[in-house]
Amino acid sequence: MYSPNISEADIQQAKYLKKYSDSPLIRQRMHIIYLRGIGMKPGACAKAAAVHPNSVTRWVKSYMESGLEQLQQHAAYKPQSELVTYADKIKKDFEYDAPQSIKQACQRIYQLTGLKRGPTQVRHFIRRVLNYRYRKYRPLPGGKKTMEELAQIQTKFIKSTLQPLLDKASRGVAEVFFMDAAHPVLGFHSGQVWSENPLYLRTSSGRYRMNILGAMQAISKELFSITTSDYIKATTVVEMIKFLREELPSKRIHIVLDNARYQRCKLVAKAAKQYRVHLVFLPPYSPNLNLIERFWKLLKKQVLVGVYYPNKKAFIQAVHQFIDQVNDGHFDDHIQSIMKLNFQTFKAV
């Protein structure tokens, strides 16, 4: 029977590590070294530490050869799927024609590699190795321009027009607003929640629609809005321009907006000139560059999804209340999080 020569310093270190090490395995190893160091037999050590006797023999021999440092090395065993060797080939195929379901992915992987794997293994491989997520299709604007051309136009607009304006706004030299219309509808809005059983939501009768023209300040995130039961028209835009000038009589005002017909017309251009407001039109098909679009998404999530309104009055009141709460600072953390002045272009996706 071998008798390991364990120094007093190692005994004390093992005594500390068997209690305070972050790794359960290292705590077991140090426990064995400590027990052997104070003179206990291998069988008694195994019983006291609740490990197999072979582990005691292996760890003590490792200590005798390399000391405590070697026993403190612990690399967890991580089995690697055979699919990993085909990762590049699978990813190239999926990029050309993305699978619509895990079942379809299983079939495609089997055709490409000859390896038959179940849905759980394939899902784990797709998420952890390929770094894919289950995503919705995103609409690509029509027209003759390609995605690359649209990306170049957006990138140029951000660098040459939008970013300089935002820099001025951050310095307090000018006020920059992002303007757009939203049309919340009284009715059922689909959403998802975590629940043990399916949840049923009553639906409102009718299809009443609110029409809101909003202008969000780029830095303070304050929202100015005009609500109407009529359509949003050029006269509504003129009313907003006039309102902003009255609120900020001595400021330079820039409004970033899209190319809707009721906004890009002679009446609006004349009003902008009259009230000394600079209109900055976004490139075609660029809702991703309009900051207020994120706010409308938040409004839908907070006010419409999963909520039943018994009548039109309650619905209108809820929308106005949410806008008031935003301006009163009730959603400041959320607003600041989603309204950062970072803009995703087509190239990025």
Image (cartoon, helix red, strand yellow):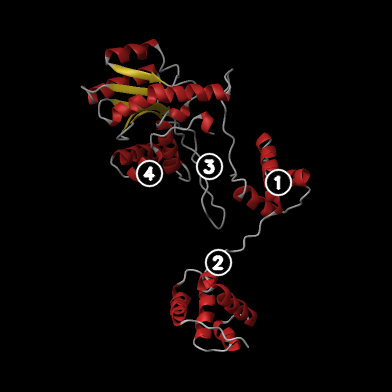
In the drawing, does residue 255 fall left or right of residue 343?
left
Cβ atoms at labels 4 and 3 below 8 Å apart: no
Which mark's residue is nearer the viewer, 2 or 1? 2
Find out whether the residues at labels 4 and 2 contact each other: C-beta distance under 8 Å. Answer: no
Most foreground residue, 237 or 332: 332
| SS under mark 4 | helix
Residue name at image x 68 percent, y 47 percent:
102
> Which label lies toward us, 1 or 3?
1
Q: Residue at x 52, y 89 (%)?
A: 39
Is 217 left or right of 111, judged from the image as shown? Answer: left
Q: Quadrant of the N terminus?
A: bottom right
- Which is closer to the viewer, label 2 or label 3? 2
Residue on which disc 3 sits: 190
Quadrant holding the C terminus: top right
Inspect the image, locate mark 4, and give the three-letter code of the amino acid beneath it: His
Q: Nearer the viewer, residue 44 or 39?
A: 39
Q: CA distance from mark 4 to mark 3?
A: 22 Å
Instruction: Choose the circle earlier in sequence order: 4 or 3.
Output: 3
Q: Does 41 sit above or below residue 73?
A: below
Label 2 sits on a secondary structure element that is loop
Up/down of 326 relative to 230, above or below: below
Q: Earlier in the sequence, mark 1 or mark 3?
A: 1
Which of the marked residues, 2 or 3, is nearer the chain's N terminus?
Answer: 2
Q: Which mark is residue 74?
A: 2
What is the number of the mark on residue 86? Answer: 1
Q: Sequence-wise, which precedes: disc 4 or disc 2?
A: 2
